[in-house]
Each structure stands twice: as structure tokens, then as C-alpha cells.
Image (cartoon, grey):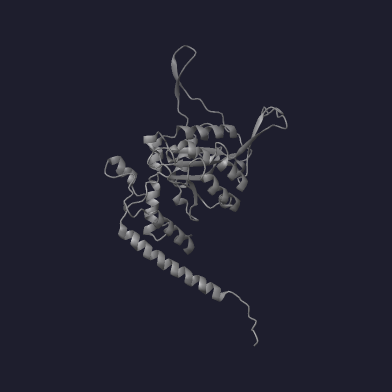
Amino acid sequence: MLKLRHKITRLKWAIDTYNGDERAWPDCYHTVHGDEKWFFLMRDGVPCRVFPTWEENDDGGMEHRITLAAAARVYHKSRCPKVMFLTAIARPRPDHDFDGKVGIWNFTKVRKAKRSNRNTGTVAGETDIVETVTVDADEYRSVMLKKGGVFDAIHTKMWWFKRDSGEPEAGHPIIYQHDGAKPHTAKKNEKLWASHGAQKGFRIVVRTQPAQSPDLNVNDLAFFASLQSDTELVAKENVTDLIHAVESCWQAYPAERMENVWSCPFGSFKGIVDTSGDNSYSHHSGSRTAHRRGTGDRQDRAFGVKRIKEARLSLEEMKKMSDVLQDDALADAPGDTSSDEN
């Protein structure tokens, strides 16, 4: 479904990312990927497996028992409660005791119940009600710039990029990458990204990835699916339990799995170059199996210079084709047919 303009921007992004000096893709240690995802309280039609455990009976002996968790209650399966989370992740740095988890934020607000309900145990003025918040430009800006937000978390977790840290990366820019959703690219927000990114001794540069390119964001590539699978193993009854489940799985997510997640972009870069910006390449290269068997590198960043040169030639041809199509469209467009008289 990609159009020519999409393929051009995707191929240019991959070529610009390539590090010609090392003949490989960059190690991505200076990159933070951010994105949002809906997490649902439950999914319709998913089996629940419950295993027996050893428990003490009334006679003091041990026996197998099956304990069922309380079932989640929803009004209708098409109105299943859900919460949107924003996650910011980077590649782990064991030398700095950094597991790659920059931060996670949910778009909710808590208010007191207005009415009492005997069936649910809700008490007016006492029970907390969790409500989702619409993610517009103002809400996204608040999460990015507030105290404890995305920028603040980058300052705290990736301290070695600070100008006076004394580390080799001191003063180097940190790239925060997100997609082109309207709250992300609002003009009033883009001006603030630049000003706030140059504060507290850091250089944070916000970049928008090409359109129709979820394969260029690690969250969409692998991390969201991995975190979702962990969350589904936790029993949840309501939205509050859902938030606690997602955040607890986030805290328990190991650095080893995060490192494996960050092997995915290298395969995407290679596939985009080989297919001239298309997404028809194979997304499963077998690198995980080869690494487990000891016959390959999980983080294979090597790439031939010849293939990059061919990709640059292909990019120029695609640009010429795009210019021709634009000229033809302008020629076919209805214009002013009135004639000027001398």
C-alpha cells in the first residue's frame, strides 16, 4: 500500500542512517524511540489456562487445587476498558547500569465517584474512578516536558550524554524518534522540542520517522508485542488493575530481552535498502536462532558499500519518476482557460 513518495522518504531515511565510515548501521546507543499503544483489559476469545498448585488441606496434608482468579467484568466486548500508554526505550548500556527503559506514562486521570452503586461497591465522594484522557497536542506536550516526563527521564537515565559528564558521549546529541501523529507534529510543539532539548546540558533532537513506517520504530517492531504478552499473564479485574499490570511488567522487563528487541531495526534498514523503500522484505532473518546456536551475531550491523551505492542510484531514479508524475498531474489539472488579449 506504499506510494512512491513513501518509498522515497523511507529509502532516504535508511541511506542517511547508514554509517559509511564503519560500513555498518549505527549502534543506536544515542537513539530513544517513543510511541503510544492501547492496552485492553481483556481480549475476546482468548483461552485462559489455569494450572493446579500444591496447597494444604484441612487434615494438614498437601493436595492439588485449582484457584481461579476473579473474572474481569465488562459491559460489552466492543466497549472493553482500555488505557493508552506512552513508552520511551533505548538500547541498554550495561556499562552504565542502564536497562534501556527510559520511562512509561499512561494517559488517565483520577476523580472521585459522583454516585454510589451497591453492585460495584462505589461510594460517592470516596471511590476513585479512573478515566482515559484524549491524547491531543496539549496532552502530549505535557507528558514530554513536565517534571518526570520524557525529557526529564532522558536527563536522569542517560546522564552520560550531559555536557560535563566526563564520558566519551558527553555533549553528543540524543535522538528522540516518534511517528508523524498530529499531536507529535503540531507546530506549537515542534518549537518547544528544540528549546527544551537544549536545556540542562543536554542536546535532545526530536525527529519524525517517515510516514507509513512502523518498521522503523522499535516499539512497533517488537517491544509492544513483547510487553503485551507479559501483561496478558496477569489477572485483571478493572482499569486500575490493568495499569498496575502494565507497569509491573514494565519494571520486570529484563535488559537481555530489550537488547534482543534492538536487533530488529538493523533488519529493517537492510530490507528497506534492498527493496528500494518497500516493505515487502522478509521480517524474519533467523538471526535469533543463529545467535542461540552460536553461529551468528544477534546485532549484525554490517552492510556492503556497493549495496548502498545501488540504493542511492535507485533513489535518484525514483525522484526523477516522482517529478515526472507531478508534472503530468499539473498538466492534467484544470487551469485558467481565459486568454489574454493584446
Percent position (x, y) of residue 227?
47, 39
In the image, residue 146 sits, relative to residue 25, either above or below, namely above
Residue 204 percent location from the top left of the image? 48, 46
Q: Position of residue 150 (x, y in %)?
A: 52, 41
Q: Residue furthest top?
A: 59
For the residue pair 54 and 322, the one nearer the viewer reads as 322
**Residue 102 falls left or right of residue 23:** right
Q: Is residue 113 left or right of residue 332?
A: right
Residue at the bottom extreme?
A: 342
Name of the residue lying farthest toward the left: 295
Q: Nearer the viewer, residue 71 or 289?
A: 289
Q: Is residue 331 above or below residue 178?
A: below
The quarter holding residue 338 reads bottom right
Residue drawn at x 54%, y 72% is: 329
Task: Pick the residue in front: 5 or 161.
Answer: 161
What residue sits 61% from the left and 48% below the top? 137
